[in-house]
Image (cartoon, helix red, strand yellow):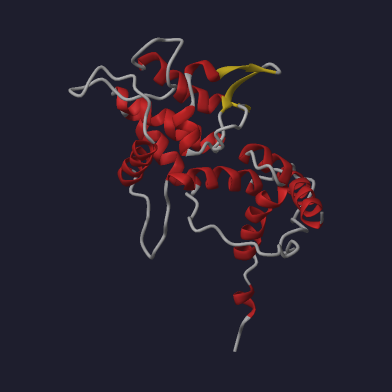
C-alpha cells in the first residue's frame, strides 16, 4: 500500500513539475517500502534513444522486411508485448473497444482469455504500414508473418526464435551498447515500456495495466528497481 501511494504521489508531483506548478520534485530521493523477496531484473532496459533509433531504421528501410520488423518493434516497445504474444497475434485480433483501436492480446498462458490493449497512434503507424505489405489474406492469419522469398510465398506464423532474431538484428544495426556486461534482449523492450510509464509520471496501476500483471506486487518490482539505482546507498559511502 505504501508503494502504491508513493507511486501516485510521484505521478502527481512529476505532472506538477512539468506544468510549472512546482520548482522541484519533493518525492525525489524518497524510497519505497522494501519488497520481501524482490529481485532485480536480469535484463537491462533500452534507453529511449536506442528504441527511437531502432524504430527509425525500420521506418527508413523501404523493404517489406523493414515494415515487418518495425511492426514487431513497435508492438513490443509501445505495448509491452512478449515474444509469445507477438507470435500468437492474428489480424482478427485488431479491433475497437471503448472507442479506441485495440489489439486483443493472447497472454503467455495457454488458457488466458484475450485482453484488449490500446494501440497508440505512433504504434499503429508501424502496424498499418506492415499490413499494407503483409502477404496472405488481408482479414485472416497471423498479424506478423514470414516474408515471401525462395523458401515460399510467406504469410506463415513467426517462431519466437525468429522474433528474437529480428530484435537482435535491429539492435546490432542501431549499434546498441552491449559493452561491460550490459544485457538487452527482445524481452528488454517490454521491460523498457513498463519502466517508461513509471519514469514519465504514470501510476503503478497504469504500469500494471500495460504489463498485464495479475498481481500489483509483480509490477512493484519495477518501482523497487528504479529506487535502487536512482537513490543508491553506495553514493552515501565516503571516506
Left or right of 49: which side holds 165? left
Return the x and y of residue 212 as percentages of the image width and height.
64, 38
Q: Is residue 119 visible?
A: no
Q: Which residue is situated farthest in the front direction here?
A: 111
Left or right of 197: which side holds 2? right
Viewer-nearest residue: 72 or 154: 154
Return the x and y of residue 173 as percentages of the image width and height.
30, 43
Q: Can you say which quadrant of the picture contains the C terminus?
A: bottom right
Residue positioned 35% across, 16% down in the render: 133
Tell me which corner region of the image, top left, top right, bottom left or bottom right, holds residue 118: top right
- Figure check: 11 above or below 156: below
Viewer-nearest residue: 136 or 121: 136
Q: Is residue 166 visible?
A: yes
- Figure check: 96 above or below 232: above
Q: Can you say which quadrant of the picture contains the N terminus?
A: bottom right
- Figure check: 107 above or below 191: above
Viewer-nearest residue: 209 or 174: 209
Residue positioned 74% across, 46% down in the render: 11
- Number of marks in the image? 0
Q: Which residue is situated farthest in the left direction here?
A: 150
Amino acid at each position: 500500500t505504501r508503494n502504491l501511494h508513493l507511486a501516485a504521489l510521484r505521478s502527481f508531483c512529476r505532472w506538477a513539475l512539468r506544468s510549472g506548478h512546482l520548482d522541484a520534485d519533493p518525492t525525489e530521493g524518497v524510497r519505497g517500502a522494501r519488497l520481501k523477496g524482490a529481485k532485480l531484473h536480469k535484463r537491462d532496459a533500452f534507453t529511449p534513444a536506442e528504441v527511437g533509433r531502432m524504430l527509425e531504421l525500420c521506418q527508413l528501410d523501404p523493404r517489406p522486411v523493414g515494415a515487418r520488423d518495425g511492426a514487431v518493434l513497435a508492438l513490443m516497445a509501445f505495448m509491452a508485448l512478449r515474444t509469445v504474444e507477438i507470435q500468437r497475434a492474428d489480424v482478427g485480433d485488431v479491433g475497437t473497444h471503448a472507442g479506441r483501436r485495440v489489439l486483443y492480446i493472447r497472454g503467455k498462458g495457454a488458457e488466458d482469455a484475450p485482453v484488449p490493449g490500446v494501440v497508440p497512434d505512433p504504434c499503429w503507424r508501424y502496424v498499418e504500414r506492415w499490413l499494407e505489405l503483409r502477404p496472405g489474406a488481408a482479414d485472416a492469419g497471423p498479424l506478423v508473418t514470414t516474408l515471401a522469398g525462395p523458401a515460399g510465398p510467406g504469410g506463415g506464423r513467426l517462431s519466437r526464435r525468429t522474433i528474437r532474431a529480428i530484435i537482435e538484428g535491429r539492435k546490432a544495426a542501431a549499434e546498441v551498447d552491449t559493452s561491460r556486461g550490459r544485457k538487452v534482449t527482445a524481452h528488454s523492450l517490454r521491460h523498457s515500456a513498463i519502466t517508461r510509464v513509471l519514469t514519465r509520471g504514470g501510476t503503478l496501476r497504469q504500469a500494471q495495466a500495460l504489463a498485464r500483471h495479475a498481481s500489483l506486487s509483480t509490477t512493484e518490482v519495477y518501482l523497487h528497481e528504479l529506487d535502487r539505482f536512482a537513490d543508491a546507498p553506495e553514493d552515501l559511502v565516503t571516506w
